[in-house]
Amino acid sequence: MSIDRGEGKVEVESEDIDWVELEYRVNLEDATSALQPTVKDGVVYGYGPAFLVLPAQQVLDRTRDVQIELHTPTDWNVVSTWTQVAQKVSSVDPNMTVRAFQATDGQALRDAFLAGGRRLSVDRLLDDLDVAYGPEFRGDRERVGKVIADAVSAYRSDYGHLGPVKVLVRTTAEADRGNLGGLGRRGGFVVELPVDATADSATALLVWHEALHLWNGHFAVPDPRSEAETRWFKEGLTHYLATVAACNHHAITSTFLLEEWARIIDAYERNPLRRRGPGTELDAARFPYDFGAILGVKLDAQARGQTSQRWLQQVLDTRGADAYEPRMLREALMKVYPAGSSLWLNISQRQDLEAAALFESIGLHFLRGSDREPRLVWVDGNARFAEIFGGCSVNAQ
């Protein structure tokens, strides 16, 4: 056996070997990134695959019905995106509980989260929606929970029921400074909120974005070889659809909507990658989010209807067992929008989107301002805005 820590590889000469067992320990006390497993206020948090040793991708792709056994103190609460199938007191130690989980396939094994501890609290919302809160969270659990339940219910109605959903609400120092974070998982998602979070528009949009990743990102999955070039669909189009859905269900205010889109337009127009110029790592990370979001607006503005939503539905319906790549996305677009060939040029050739002009066509004037604080101003009398962002059109100015 050889271990390459830099590559994250454990290589085993497996010829004539039927079984390999690895025993390892995970350091919970010295996490160097938000994704690494950690313990905080007595609660253990683990996000897959950071705390797992996984087989090679070609093995993982063929893996089905993985059995997982978790031993914890009996008084712990536990929440995981893996499906729990059994639970009993340990026959060896009566102070320990053994929980049996199952991951339906390699993707579910890999894209998971697990949290457990005495001070972890769990609310059951709907029949199959559990929301867990870290002990430091002192925010409005009732209203935050309602936002989560509303988002999951709405997307189930639009895109289909995928099974039980687990949600983890954590607090972080970054979130306390206003940098909310989220992480989509297969069968659930994580949101990082301030300790005293309310169900304001920023919290709501984060929830609606991460909830949509249950469908776009963890049910419909990009091919690993195409992940970078399809991130505009996974992240950017997701964000556009999340703003539309949150608006139409009155989860965000019209004022917040205009502020959010002003930031998106400003970031896109300032990004040197927009015109294929050199950019920083931050420019590269931000570009697909903004490009894909604006692309969704352009599609629905041209088609005069929620064609972007039908586009995602077409990808979900035709995905089969395959991860999507550009060809599949293009074919799905052509089925819902026959005039989409010109739009695909924007994507395949990364052509520039005239964002300010696009939003002006639906009655929103973009103003950058001398203080670098961008603004969108709603112009009365243009019905196109209401066609797209109907739920936020009332009192939009």
Image (cartoon, rainbow, N blue to C red):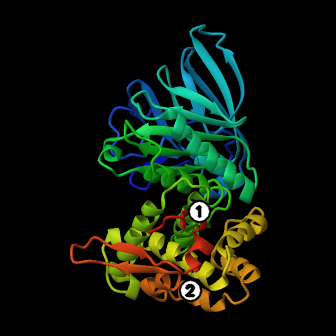
Q: Is residue 155 left or right of residue 115?
A: right
| x, y percent for residue 110 | 59, 48
- How crowded pointer 2 is (Cα within 10 Å; few <14, some 14-19, many 20+) is rated as few
Give whichever of 15, 4 is nearer the camera: 4
| x, y percent for residue 128 | 71, 37
Q: Is residue 131 left or right of residue 259?
A: right
Label 1: which secondary element: helix
Query: Label 1 belongs to which residue?
Result: 391
> Where is the C terminus found, in terms of image quarters?
bottom left
Give whichever of 144, 69 is nearer the camera: 144
Q: Looking at the rendering, which quadrant does residue 338 occupy?
A: bottom right
**Residue 186 shows up from this direction:** no
Q: Is residue 214 above or below residue 307?
A: above
Residue furthest to the left: 371
Q: Nearer the viewer, mark 2 or mark 1?
A: 1
Could you tell me the amino acid type at mark 1? Answer: Gly
- Give the number of the disc on residue 134: none
Q: Is residue 196 above or below residue 371?
A: above
Residue at 46 percent across and 22 percent down: it is 119
**Residue 7 shows up from this direction:** yes
Label 2: which secondary element: helix
Residue furthest to the bottom: 342
Could you tell me the amino acid type at mark 2? Answer: Ser
Q: Earlier in the sequence, mark 2 or mark 1?
A: 2
Residue furthest to the top: 94
Query: Label 2 belongs to which residue?
Result: 348
Q: Is residue 69 left or right of residue 373?
A: right
Dot 2 and dot 1 residues touching (CB under 8 Å): no
Give whichever of 139, 393 is nearer the camera: 393
| x, y percent for residue 73 | 54, 16
Residue at 56 percent across and 9 percent down: it is 95
| x, y percent for residue 176 | 32, 43
